[in-house]
Image (spheres, rainbow, N blue to C red):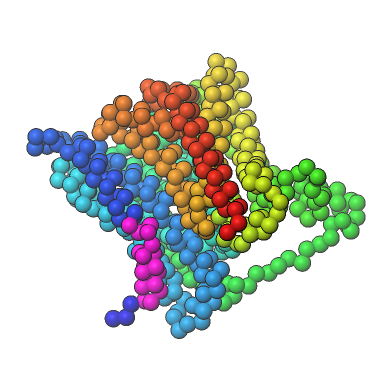
Amino acid sequence: MTVNPIIRRELISVLRSRWALGMQLGPIAIFSLLVILRWPSEGQVDVAGRQAQQVFRLFGYGLLAMLLLLAPAYPAVSIVAEKKRGTLALLLNTPLSRPSIYLGKLLGALGYIALPLAMSVPAVAACYAMGGLSLTRDIGVLYLVLALVTVQYTALALWISSFATSTDSALRITYGTVLLLAVGTLGPYLFLQGHPDTRAAHVAGWIRCISPIPAVMELVGQGDVGGHGLIADAGAPLRYGVLALATTIALAVHTTWRLTPTLFDRARPAGNNTLGASKSRQWLRRIAFVVDPERRTKPMGRFTNPVLVKEFRTRRFGRSQWMLRLVAVCALASLGLTYAATTGTLSWGVETIGGIMVLLQVALIVMLTPSLAAGLISSERESGGWALLQMTPLSTGRILRGKLLSVGATMLLILLATLPGYAIMMVIKPVLQQQVLLVLACLLLTAMFAVCLSAAVSSLFRHTAPATIASYALLIALCGGPLLLWLGRDAPFGHDLVQAALRIDPIAAALSILEVSNFSQYNVLPANWWIIASATAFSLALLTFRTWRLTQPR
């Protein structure tokens, strides 16, 4: 039997990388440690299976978070990287059919992503030996859902990769879409729960099942996400399975259909001369676009940082019209939460609404910062632009200031656009004024840390794709990893261990300030500020040193 040559090429190339060893050793070390921490002492097994259920719950959350982070990374750059190297055109002209090409890339990516799932089996077997778990109803169904997550997000990443024009844009769009599907789809149900008889609530219940999070929470016996004590309809795993299969088939069919030589055809707009138009048309475009994308920009001033201007004019989110659109979307989201704060205060409380806003802002920081800052240095080295920067009389400090300010200004605008919700909170409950100011300080420090960390990671890599993946991995591990320990508070992790883990998490610091339920009992400040500030200073020093080394003549 002949094996698809694309599968052989994809798997061999990725398994020879140094990341493959980490994919094998990392999961087995982490999950084995969980079992060791809760292994029964003196050979006594808990008859009710509470210890096994506690470890199994962390297994489910940990594996899901790992798959959401790792599954889109490799397939998101698979097709676009071939397109940039020029090998995709050669591949499409081989005797291989389009389904064979797509199937080869899909199975090659799945073979790589299946490593953490395979490495977690021994630890799950040990957890099953502790008793209290069903091999089919608990472990089997959980692994089936996780396999669907892997296939679905791999197909999604390949579909996005077929449209992308660069590896960094493919990663940025893929991770943004994953965050929207996994977390953003929970929003409508969060606000409409408690009204099961309405059509909108029924639709919101199906929309939330697009995310795998409710399915996993139901399987591990945690209840419903964001339930607020309300009982939700069961059947989230079955609903997610139907939706995941439908979306995977649709994405696979459309991606296969796109794998033709016409994939390289790009229609370029002819454009128009707005300066030669009539005055009425120019004023109409100013009103419609606020900032006209086709209007000629003014020349740079004498004291303007040229690197800052270059970053704004060459990056999509740096251009004025795209920044205004991004700010408008964030402002609308903040106003929506403001409305929820005014109408839902009696049932939820201002602190709960504030916690949702904190999660929204941190999600924006984690989603956008690596996509903007992880290519500051690596993209210049990859494209050859760094050699041109070395020929200029610009100093290391001026280069860094221009690049960091270009990302910092964008993130500051996004954070400012979400402030109306906090203002309404202070009007509703004036005693929260000091807490809100402390939360804003936490978010500002988090944004500074995310920018410096992503830029420092960018200076360590020659290519943008691995720099972006590493930045996302570090930020998600920092913000999400301690929350996994928090989910296992008191069982299997003690109060002191959870509190020590939360001290490095900026999300936990903001939630504890707002006294959100189950976070107010942990004292994470001011230790969190000292840790994040020290990490920011270290990242900035590493970035400065690496940039200085790169500017030196070879």
Answer left or right for 324 relative to 115.
Answer: right
Main SS class of the magenta portion in the image: helix
Furthest residue to the left?
Answer: 43
Which residue lies at the image location 38% right of the left edge and 54% below the top edge? 149
Answer left or right for 532 relative to 287.
Answer: left
Which sits in the foreground, 175 or 84?
84
> In the image, is residue 211 part of the stretch drawn in magenta?
no
* The quadrant where residue 391 appears: bottom right
Answer left or right for 455 relative to 285.
Answer: left
x and y percent of residue 145 in the render? 33, 53
Q: For the C terminus, which image quadrant?
A: bottom right
Q: Is residue 389 visible?
A: yes
x and y percent of residue 513 in the render? 48, 23
x and y percent of residue 357 in the render? 53, 33
Q: For the N terminus, which image quadrant?
A: bottom left
Which residue lies at the image location 38% right of the left edge and 36% below the top edge? 482
Which sits in the foreground, 408 or 158?
408
Numbered range of the magenta stretch: 4-21
Which residue lies at the image location 51% right of the left edge and 24% below the top edge? 350
x and y percent of residue 168 in the render? 55, 57
With respect to residue 370, does 479 lie above or below?
above
Q: Is residue 509 visible?
A: no
